Amino acid sequence: MERLAALFPNGFTIVMASGIISIDALKLGHAWVGGALFAVAIAAWLLACAAGVVRGRRDGRALGDALTHHESGPGSLSLVAATAILGSLFAAFHVAAWLVTPLFGLSVLLWWITQYGFLAGVTERRTKPPLEAGLSGQWLLVVVATEALASLGADIATSPALAFVCYAWVLLGGVYYLLLGALVLYRFTFVAMPPEDLAGPWWINEGAAAITVLAGGKLMTSGLSIGAFPLRDLLAPIIVIFWSDATFWIPLLLLLFAWKHLTRRRAFRYSMQQWSVVFPLGMYCAGTLELERTYGLGFLHPLARAVFWIALLGWCGAFVGAVRVVFNRDGTPRPAPG
């Protein structure tokens, strides 16, 4: 039960990574790969939810307190993003379509609870950590969760009202990104960054920009009219700007993480944070494919396909690492704790 409880909320990053790469695979014509990852995403979501129930029953107060901490609070927003991405999976595969709307409603409810619970909680705390201790890449989940709602909303929007709300979410996520991105860049350039501080969640900087491209592009191609509001024209340059930003982060993060591993000279070992690297790469592929579809930019297709295979390779590595944690190297289950 200890291991199961430890999957909440970080286990939802497995759902996010598996889900978006599944959608990428479907769009690129690898339906069997997408179907397999779809099944993994469903199983991981159910397992992570069960972990949340176990943690809540064992110590609900501690679970609620974690939401209001600068270090742990942002991770709760992965629950929102994972649920919304799961809904987008059902919509993309046209399977159990009746689940898409309930998952959207659940995502909205979770967004209200976690987003405002986290931001209000850290604001009210009397003792606050310094920037280098409190800020991490997980803070960009504020953006990811918001844009994931807009992306799923674009899948089911049939009315101007819902389309307008989804446009508002895209723009709100963009504002969050500008505010948090400035803090992240300040953290990188003006505060000491030892190698051990370079962790997987910093890759969410790139994933947050990429999901903004995905959500904005889906709305622009939805064909829904929203009256006199020129929101479609407003998003046109925005999604290109955010795609450029997502592209900017990849070489920088590769350089920084290469520096980290060359400095420490330690063997790669599995950690849950590896899923925070896989998800942004899969989201970059999805955003690039959406940008290609929105503007007819066929020259972007080879880039998206290349990143897809890199993301899939990363997923396989993380999955093997997770299995090795559950089982001993000889394949036998580990003894139960205690």
Image (cartoon, rainbow, N blue to C red):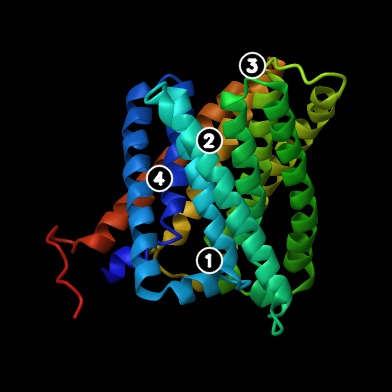
Q: Residues within 10 Å of mark 2 (few under 14, many from 20)?
A: some
Residue 26, position as x, y percentages in the image: 43, 24
List the residue tagged with mark 1: 262
Image-quadrant location for residue 133: bottom right
Q: In the figure, is residue 88 to the left or right of 171?
A: left
Question: In the rendered view, would you say 85 is above or below 66?
Answer: above
Cα gap from disc 4 to disc 2, whole angstroms:
12 Å
List the residue tagged with mark 4: 315
Q: Residue at x 71, y 75 (%)?
A: 124
Q: Secondary structure at mark 2?
A: helix
Q: Can I make out residue 229 in this image?
A: yes
List the residue tagged with mark 2: 307
Q: Are the two marked residues, 4 and 1, in contact with CB atoms closer than 8 angstroms?
A: no
Q: In the figure, is residue 131 to the left or right of 152?
A: right
Q: Are the two marked residues, 3 and 2, in contact with CB atoms closer than 8 angstroms?
A: no
Q: Residue at x 36, y 36 (%)?
A: 37
List the residue tagged with mark 3: 298
Quarter of the picture holding the N terminus: bottom left
Residue 76, position as x, y percentages in the image: 53, 60
Q: Residues within 10 Å of mark 3 (few under 14, many from 20)?
A: few
Q: Secondary structure at mark 3?
A: helix
Q: Nearer the viewer, residue 235 or 228?
A: 228
Q: Residue at x 40, y 67 (%)?
A: 56
Residue 134, position as x, y percentages in the image: 66, 73
Q: Are the two marked residues, 4 and 2, in contact with CB atoms closer than 8 angstroms?
A: no
